[in-house]
Image: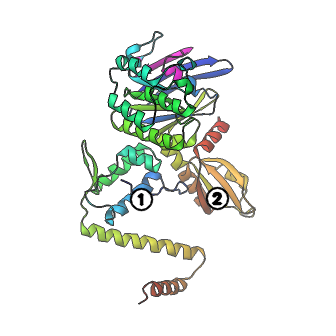
Amino acid sequence: MWIPIQINENSAEPLYHQIEVQLRSLILSGQVEEGTLLPSIREFANDLKCSVITVRRVYQDLESEGLLRTKQGTGTFVAKVGSDERDRHRRTAVVEAMESAVDVGMQVQCTKEDLKAIFKEVLDAKYKG
Amino acid sequence: MVVRMKGIAKERGKLQIGPMDLDIPSGYVTAIVGSNGSGKSTLMNMMMQLVHPDQGQIELLGHTLAGEHQWELKKRIGYVMEKSWNDQNGDTLERIVTEMKYWYPTWNQALYERMVDVFEIDPKQRFGKMSKGTRRKCEFIIGFVHEPELLLLDEPSSGLDPLSWKFMLDEIRAYMDRGDRAVILASHIIDEVKRLADYVVFMHKGKLLGRYEKDQLIDDWKALWVEASPEVVDRVSLRRLGGVMALENESRNVVKIVTLDVSMTEMALEQAGLRVLRTGGVELDEILTYLIQQS
């Protein structure tokens, strides 16, 4: 199966971290469903053009977070995720996106009032009708 | 470790290879990267006992190589060489396979048949009449289909069309998944290395520059574009910051720094109050160039 994860080699963020963040998001948002069998470590590594060392680390980290489950001889599956955790993740995703937007605003010297006005404008436009 | 080399040295004409120590781990794909003439093929030939080192010791799959050919050991290794044997021109895949089946106890007939099918080979065709790519596919089949514990590939994608290369990658991947194996691949083609390798060994003019985890190199080596107007900072001083390998003037106010340790350099830049405008990756062949310059 193909999992939509994109590595950015230009980013200062380590590869394993980039993959973890994206895979965690896919699992918590439900895009990759509970019970899904993930690709073998080497298959995933080939697809992403990274090493098995990195993929193994990702699978291990997410397993210790309770998001993945490994069955000896069969493979690694997506575990059941509680609804509390899903909600927390949704909130965190939005908070992070807003923090990035504020960073951009600060870089171009916007004031707090400027940003509030821009935010209201965008919000109204998106939630129109 | 699948291969252990200690104090290995070999003289090949003007090229002095080693002395060097090198360990290759089992369960992973290790790429030996260097330009033609770096000594990587000689290294592979020594592992196959086609060439003997002038000095030092090689241990392969736990056995010390000692002059005489160890045939039982050879049955556990597969080798796909860079150049084809001219004296095999009159041969066919079918005939060679008839012999090999008896020689290799781990010969996998089903795998052989599937590969002949996937690669669209005519086993009755003479090697001398095949295109370079087709012949290469046959050589791969011959080296691979007895499911060796150690697979040595010398420039595997050479002469292959992209689709065949993709099939070969799939087969190598499936082979690694099937057991505790190792692949050592000699290459100067970065895409091959990126797709396959877990570890990278850099060689230049016979010298070993180091063994690295491929992803560690990709994570640590970055290009940083830094705001550095001459009124604010003396660019020469930037060279002395931790991790910096090279400095280039991009424009009046921007300098490009290449670092082998992005965390270290970013921290030093932050302490110096300098802003990073953009980050970029550094390709493996560029990394090799910087390591060569440094050595």
Residue A23, numbered label: none
- The residue type indicated by label 1 comes to Pro
Residue underneath mark 2: B225
Residue range (magenta): B44-63
Q: Chain of mark 1?
A: A
Residue underneath mark 1: A4
Q: Is residue B11 above or below residue B180?
A: above
Residue A105: horizontal and vertical position, in percent?
A: 55, 77
Q: Is residue A28 above or below residue B142?
A: below
Residue drawn 45% across and 72% down? A97
Q: Nearer the viewer, mark 2 or mark 1?
A: 1
Q: Which residue is at the far top? A: B68
Most foreground residue, B125 or A17: B125
Neighbours of disc 1 within 10 Å: few (<14), some (14-19), many (20+): few
Residue drawn 66% across and 22% down? B15
Can residue B25 be seen in the rendering of this structure?
no
Lateral position of residue A79 relative to residue B277, left or right: left
Residue B110 in which image quadrant? top left
- The residue type indicated by label 2 comes to Trp
The answer to the question of whether label 2 and label 1 lie on touching residues, with beta carbons closer than 8 A, is no
* In magenta segment, residue B165: no
Q: Chain of mark 2?
A: B
Q: Is residue A3 above or below residue B19?
A: below
